[in-house]
Image (cartoon, helix red, strand yellow):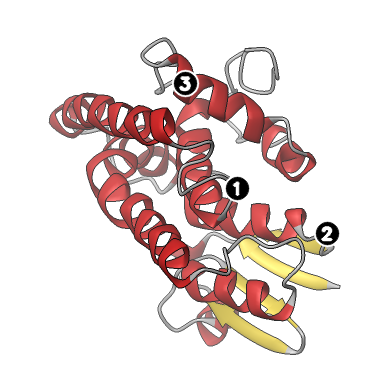
């Protein structure tokens, strides 16, 4: 069986978990306190980051590379369109969430509220939290604009772009940092993706000291 070294609320780990689950690849999940830089873990990934996936006798790191490998070796069900222009749009949006959204929102909300406490790095920076709470409104509005023109974020079918976005938003939803009343179309999109079987393990996550809100695993939130 494959093994995934991960942190439950990491959006990068969640993106890989969603890809694996959508393609029905059984995986043993191993929680890794990567910030402690355990020598065994550092041998698996000298960058000292999660996720790390052991699959097909290979040790893989970096979520984008892992998801590409999964897609190339397990093409069904597809999470990437066949058309090159559509594939470009998927990759653009994956980068949008993993870079821009992460820098402007996830790192300022999730990392400040949760990671600092777990890693014993002090108290949240109120300025970062304020900036993240402001920035997420812009991103939700951008998602709403995309979904006003498309069935899914990158086009007419669900793709890795939707999983990348859902990975970040689900992590933030765990700590009640998503205003679902801001956009009905974004809330409807999340309800669709949240109801997929691939999402079940994410909705079952429990982080000690951080209980999820009641609506977190409610499909009719």
Quarter of the C terminus within the rendering: top right
- Circle number at residue 14: none
Q: Position of residue 127 (x, y in %)?
A: 13, 29
Task: Characterize the local packing of mark 2: few (<14), some (14-19) or many (20 or more) Cα atoms within 10 angstroms.
Answer: some
Please name the residue that numbered disc 2 is placed on: 24
Q: Calculate the distance from the C-alpha at mark 2 to the C-alpha at mark 1.
A: 19 Å
List the single residue furthest toward the left: 127
Please name the residue that numbered disc 1 is placed on: 157
In which quarter of the view is residue 214 placed?
top right
**First of labels 2, 1 by sequence position:** 2
Closer to the camera in the image, 148 or 77: 148
Please name the residue that numbered disc 3 is placed on: 185
**At 22% across and 42% down in the image, what residue appears?**
104
Q: Is residue 175 visible?
A: no
In which quarter of the view is residue 183 placed?
top left
Under circle 3, the secondary element is: helix
Closer to the camera in the image, 156 or 29: 156
* Looking at the image, residue 81 lies above or below residue 15: below
**First of labels 3, 1 by sequence position:** 1
Q: Position of residue 189 (x, y in %)?
A: 55, 29
Under circle 1, the secondary element is: loop
| Contact between labelled residues 1 and 2, with CB atoms less than 8 Å apart | no
**At 38% across and 37% down in the image, what residue appears?**
110
């Amino acid at each position: 069986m494959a093994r995934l070294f991960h942190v439950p609320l990491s959006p990068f780990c969640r993106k890989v978990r969603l890809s694996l689950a959508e393609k029905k690849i059984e995986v043993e999940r191993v929680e890794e306190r990567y910030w402690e830089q355990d020598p065994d873990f550092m041998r698996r990934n000298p960058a000292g980051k999660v996720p790390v996936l052991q699959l097909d006798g290979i040790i893989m790191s970096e979520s984008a590379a892992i998801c590409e490998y999964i897609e190339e070796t397990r093409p069904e069900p597809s999470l990437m369109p066949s058309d090159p222009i559509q594939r470009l749009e998927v990759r653009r949006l994956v980068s949008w969430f993993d870079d821009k959204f992460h820098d402007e929102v996830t790192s300022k909300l999730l990392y400040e509220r949760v990671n600092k406490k777990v890693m014993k790095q002090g108290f949240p920076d109120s300025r970062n939290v304020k900036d993240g709470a402001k920035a997420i409104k812009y991103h939700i509005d951008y998602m709403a604009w995309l979904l006003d023109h498309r069935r899914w974020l990158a086009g007419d079918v669900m793709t890795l772009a939707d999983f990348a976005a859902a990975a970040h938003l689900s992590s933030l939803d765990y700590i009640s940092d998503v205003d679902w009343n801001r956009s009905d179309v974004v809330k409807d999109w999340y309800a669709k993706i949240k109801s997929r079987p691939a999402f079940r393990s994410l909705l079952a996550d429990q982080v000690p000291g951080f209980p999820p809100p009641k609506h977190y695993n409610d499909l009719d939130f």
